[in-house]
Amino acid sequence: MSAKINRRGFLNTTLALGALTALPTAAFAKSISRFSLSKSGFALKGYDTTAYFQAGKPTNGTDATTVTYKGAKWRFATAQDAALFQDNPEAYEPQFGGYCTRAMSLRKEVPGDPEVWRLHNGKLYVFFAPVGGKHFDKGEDAMIALAQKHWDTLTKVS
């Protein structure tokens, strides 16, 4: 059975396809929160993000030292840590919003586990599971580049 295409049908189809291709790609981008948040709304599941840099280990924050930054609540172990973060939050916030770096490199959005982390070139990266960190250790820059490419396609909330 052959379908007949008339001039009107051809024009309508061409116009519809043209309209679709004229839409910005951002209209089709997936939207995720700028930060992976716990059920209670804390970034990094309430861990003190400065502790990775200062103490070299994950440290729980407290409700007494909470800071709001870019719509997320951040907990800190001490008032000094909170002040350090407030002075330069970009230096301490986890890369890819605290989502798993390996998953992000595979074009997936999976919350990171603050207990599974790496520091690389002065930046904090978290992973869903230890295997993600092990893969990261085999090629940090390549994984970061892939993760960044996917992260850039996502619409981030300010």
Image: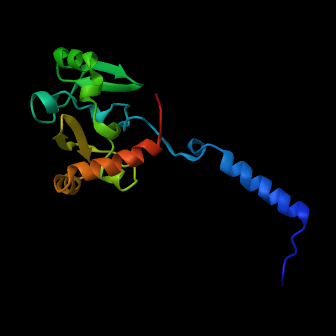
Q: How many marks?
A: 0
Task: Classify 70 as above or below 151.
Answer: above
Residue at coordinates 18% horizontally, 41% vertically from top-left?
A: 120
- The reply, left or right, for residue 60 in relation to residue 9 is left
The picture places residue 132, in percent across and down from the top left corner, at: 23, 54
The picture places residue 115, in percent across and down from the top left corner, at: 19, 43
> Residue 148 appears in which quarter of the rendering?
top left
Instruction: Using the rendered image of the protein, determine whether residue 128 is visible from the camera's viewpoint.
Output: no
Residue at coordinates 90% horizontally, 64% vertically from top-left?
A: 7
Instruction: Using the rendered image of the protein, determine whether residue 54 is visible from the camera's viewpoint.
Output: yes
Residue at the bottom extreme of this rendering: 1
The picture places residue 55, in percent across and down from the top left corner, at: 9, 30
Task: Classify 140 as above or below 13.
Answer: above
Task: Classify 99 as above or below 75.
Answer: below
> Residue 60 appears in which quarter of the rendering?
top left
- The reply, left or right, for residue 13 in relation to residue 73 is right
Q: Quadrant of the N terminus?
A: bottom right
The picture places residue 62, in percent across and down from the top left corner, at: 22, 23
Residue at coordinates 47% horizontally, 32% vertically from top-left?
A: 157
Coloring basis for residues:
rainbow
Q: Nearer the viewer, residue 152 or 48?
A: 152
- The reply, left or right, for residue 108 in relation to residue 83 is right
